Amino acid sequence: MTSDELNAVYDLPYTRLPHPRYKGRRIPAYEMIRHSITIHRGCFGGCAFCTISAHQGKQIVSRSKKSILKEAEAITRMEDFKGYITDLGGPSANMYGLNGRDKNVCAKCKRPACLHPKVCPNLNTDLTPLVDLYRSVGKVPGVKKISIGSGIRYDIMQYRDPDAKADKSHRTYTEELISKHVGGRLKVAPEHTQDHVLDLMRKPPFSRFEDFKKTFDRINRECGLNQQLIPYFISSHPGCTEEDMAQLAIITKRLNFRLEQVQDFTPTPMTLSTEIFYTGINPYTMKPVYSARTDREKQAQQQFFFWYDPARRNSLIAELRRIGRSDLIPKLFHP
Ligand code: SF4
């Protein structure tokens, strides 16, 4: 799909209403999206467990600013609009307008991810068009605030791009995002704390999340804001053991998180993670990889997310003893 085709799809005269069969019923998903705008398709993150690049492609196709502004104006005319745009997003909110610098290199590229294991030097990471878009939508009469509801990739914002303009745009975007466009809670997806699991997931090391949290806390302090960072995590991903989950619990406890946005790995067609889960082998190294498979093994991992729940304490202590890591009990249950 080209940008023009994408614009043409979004320029159609949608009612922006649920199907009439839902008349009078409250639809939570609709509440979330009715004042939000999709600004691009595709994702070059290449997370090993995710199918978005298989559905939408690795190359980002962005809508024009004109098309997005037209939709923003349409939203301001909605009867229930109170001035708050709840998302300018896509699979990852901050990939708008980003593509390879040399398209010929991209056309021959076999990398599944442009960000992992390192940011590709051919990737244009200039967030200036996105900053400009937020500012422009913010000037549409009737818009009081734009919050970003889609998840963001902090590794793009942290990348030191040799191109000075792109590099500067990362700092501008980070400051404006955190100071102006967080609707109380900002979603990010470190997905795990253990780097060997993160590497299998094709995610950046956990230290990047800790660095981002410091930036988030600093900007909040400077702006007198009390906003929350909401990290997403996965248990039972191939390569993850109960000991890894115990470490995840200890580390997130140290960072003062009580996790809510968590999920247990579910094999999904067309992903590397599912191939590893199914075969028990990492196809890149041909080495065996452990995966939790039984309900018991999966539950044993997942319960570590909820270390703060007194009802799970005895079970977690028993599990730590069973895996020979009684030494972690005081770290999890004592200050
Ligand atoms: S060459 Fe780089 S920017 Fe282009 S698709 Fe490959 S990894 Fe992505």
Image (spheres, grey):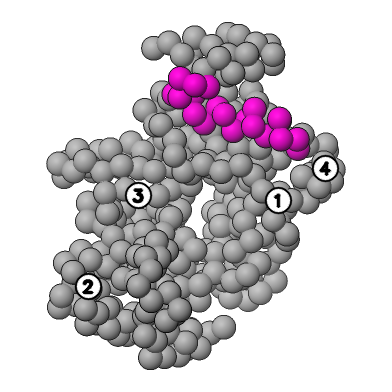
Mark in the foreground, 3 or 1: 1
Q: Amino acid at mark 4?
A: Ile
Mark 3, Cα crowd under 10 Å, few <14 / some 14-19 / many 20+, is: many
Residue at 77% x, 46% y is 276
Disc 3 + disc 4, Cβ < 8 Å: no
Query: How many marks are shown on the rendered structure?
Result: 4
Disc 4 + disc 1, Cβ < 8 Å: no
First in sequence, mark 2 or 4: give its number. 2
Q: Which residue is mark 3?
A: 186
Q: Nearer the viewer, residue 130 or 332?
A: 332
The quarter in which the C terminus is drawn is top left
Percent position of residue 40, x then y: 45, 73
Q: Amino acid at mark 1?
A: Pro
First in sequence, mark 3 or 1: give its number. 3
Spatial CA span between label 2 and label 1:
39 Å
Q: Amino acid at mark 2?
A: Phe
Q: Which residues are magenta?
A: 293-312
Q: Which residue is mark 2?
A: 81
Q: Secondary structure at mark 2?
A: loop
Q: Nearer the viewer, residue 311 or 4?
A: 311
Spatial CA span between label 4 and label 1:
15 Å
Spatial CA span between label 3 and label 4:
35 Å
Please say if 44 is above or below 250: below
Whether ligand 1 has any atom under 8 Å from the Cβ at mark 1 is answered as no
Residue at 18% x, 69% y is 82
First in sequence, mark 4 or 1: give its number. 1
Spatial CA span between label 2 and label 4:
51 Å
Q: Nearer the viewer, residue 77 or 179?
A: 77
